[in-house]
Amino acid sequence: MMPTATAKPSTQTAPWTKKDLLGLRELSAGEIRLLLQTAESFREISLRPIKKVPTLRGKTVVNLFFEPSTRTRTSFELAAKRLSADIVNIATQSSSLSKGETILDTVKNLEALKVDVLVIRHAAAGVPHLIARHATSSVINAGDGSHEHPTQALLDLFTIQERKGRLEGLNVSIIGDIAHSRVARSDIWGLTKLGARVTVCGPPTLMPPQIEQLGAPGAGGAGVRVTHNVDAAIRDADVLMLLRIQHERQESMLVPSLREYRLRYGIDRDRLKGAKPGLLIMHPGPVNRGVELDSAVADGPFSVILDQVTNGLAVRMAVLYLVSGAPKGDEDEG
Amino acid sequence: MATLLITGGHVIDPVNKRDGRYDILIDRGVIADVQPSIPLNGAKAIDAGGRLVLPGFVDLHTHLRQPGHEDKETIETGARAAIRGGFTAVCAMPNTTPAMDHRGVVDEVRQEARRVGLAAVHPIGAITRGRQGKELTDFGELFDAGCVALSDDGSAVADSFLMRRALEYAKLFGRPLIQHAEDPALSAGGVMHEGLVSTTLGLRGIPAEAESVIVARDLALAELTGSWIHLAHLSSAKSVDLIRQAKRRGIRVTCEVTPHHLALTHEAVGEFDARAKVNPPLRTEEDRQALIEALADGTIDCIATDHAPHTDWEKEADFDSAPFGISGLETALAVCVAALIAPKRLTWSQLVERLSAAPAKIAGIDGGSLNPGAPADVVLVDPAAAWTVDPKQFLSKGHHSPFAGRPLTGRVARVIARGREIDDV
Ligand SMILES: [Zn+2]
């Protein structure tokens, strides 16, 4: 069954020709819009009493997770099931690969079983790219190290568009550990390509060098705005995206302590007093309550954190559908 | 061993300021005569056919991996790769297993190199036992065993006190300590240059300062002790600036740069291409230009390959897990032609000097010139030969190169090592 895309006059899509979805950096604005429109048409399926369509019947999807992630894995699993694909979950700690056995050995074994789509999560950046170079099946990046997490960013874009009706011209501030965030990178590419203005905010230790040069050229020039001042990041924002601060950051001297981080960058009601009306609070989860985000805000009226989870399903259905439909044997790097 | 007469070649011998048509007579393994024309007189003629005739290249920085890592390289495969690249002598780095930190290992390496009989192999001993950076090795024993320098290459001697003592004690021997300049605390976990590409790819960066901090410290220690420091594989403009100033002040410092740092930048990492993963990392275009300039003005003394072979499966891993290193012996000359000769940054004579005489002088070995009486290490180069890099064809066991698929110009056509013609170049 073909999902019917409801094209809005201002949005131009591009046809999907890629074998893989490795990141948003290499996608055009038209390809991203197509993904979002396709997700829009799939969202309604989850509202039916029988939440299943036969679109990918006979296809096999493998969740190959080298790093644990219940949320993303579950979301992909349900997305595949609602499209009637067969899904296999493989959770491997890369450290437990027996000595001498490589990631590529694992993948070649799976390919010998004639699977169609590999959904890859790995703690090291570039693993999905390595696999995509050697695999004939489609590869979907479900998060690689600090590099990209394209389906998370797509669901972020989808959620903002759903709430605000547009992305163009919106101010989106991403606050937290930008240096180690794959979500931040994918969001920067996705948002700037669709015309939003992005500000990244965090302490200098969590800001990677030359981050201001990332992102598509926009009306105000290329790249993103960088500030270390959280109030400045909140002031004009239509959307705040908070990132999880991990405890390891304290150990590696990137922040003196989580308490110090909370005092400087944690978002609570007080801090939001001067914010724009209709501000959206987003978080890729899981939330570190009381560190980057106060519970009252996480569960408050501005928060769309659970919408993000719901929309993740539709977005992942769209991605599975599009990469499965693309012609195979494409030798080009996606 | 036949008497050989190389005729009809364009000789470039910077030490003797020769750059033109000469014949070279080789007898009993040494250069017997160099004249505009030499009669054959029963010698075996080698028609150079207008090719360049150069002193054999000397590599100050080669990882031969034996003993301990024979799956990556052996002395035999490494020496073959060296000859194909025009290197008639290589200096073998001590990060073997066990490390070359005592006479037994050094003897073993030299013995195997003599058995193989291709490129001459000059061992570099370790500065500290097991390259652990804790206690000094027995320098005297290592130099007596034939080491030409000492280095903990693979890692730096991080402890400033130990480095000071090492430099001081090394003065007894008049030979350099070679520093792999990398502050381990600043580079920890890093896999490529810290900059826009690492930020884009989400990879952990190694700042240029991880190198320049140690360069600055070692220059200060060399000044303090009056000892000789040689800085390996420079990668950054900052290091080069420090060394330029230090040389002006008369500090006893020499240094080297690799062909890959002269030819490539961090952009070569592309989409996580581990073939471009090397330590120190490929840096920015500004750094690359500074390295070329420093090589041209003499701040950088010589070119060294840092040939660092690994197995195919190791290099096919993801970027974080793949080991650092480029298999560089067989592409060195052509990469230098592309980076230095083609854009007219160096003349052929300058390039030859930095590949032969300059490293030979630092290593303190006989070679790098076509002096009568010198060992007959001679390389015939076809400067216009066009070829495409195919690492599968390498003689080295390391079949990985960031230059794979690149069309290059300039190829070693023939090699004579200590008077012996080597086939299969
Ligand atoms: Zn080194």
Image (cartoon, rainbow, N blue to C red):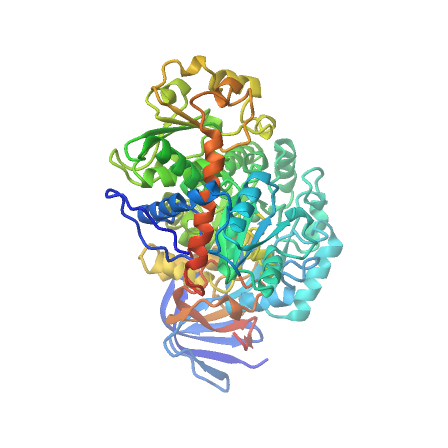
Placement of the N terminus of chain B among the 4 image quadrants: bottom right
Q: Determine the residue positioned at 72% across, 59% down.
A: B107
**Residue at the right extreme, as displayed:** B104
Side of A34 relative to A113 (left or right): left
Q: Determine the residue positioned at 56% across, 47% down.
A: A77
Q: x, y percentage for residue B48? A: 41, 78
Q: x, y percentage for residue A85? A: 53, 55
Quadrant in the picture for residue A200: top left
Name above or below for residue B327 compared with residue A267.
below
**Residue at the front extreme, as displayed:** A49
Q: How many marks?
A: 0
Quadrant in the picture for residue B91: bottom right
Q: Nearer the viewer, residue A261 or B315?
A: A261
Q: x, y percentage for residue A162? A: 37, 35
Q: x, y percentage for residue B417? A: 55, 71
Q: Nearer the viewer, residue A307 or B92?
A: A307
Q: Nearer the viewer, residue B309 or A28?
A: A28
Side of B52 relative to B232 (left or right): left
* Residue A317 appears anywhere in the view: yes
* Residue B194 appears anywhere in the view: no
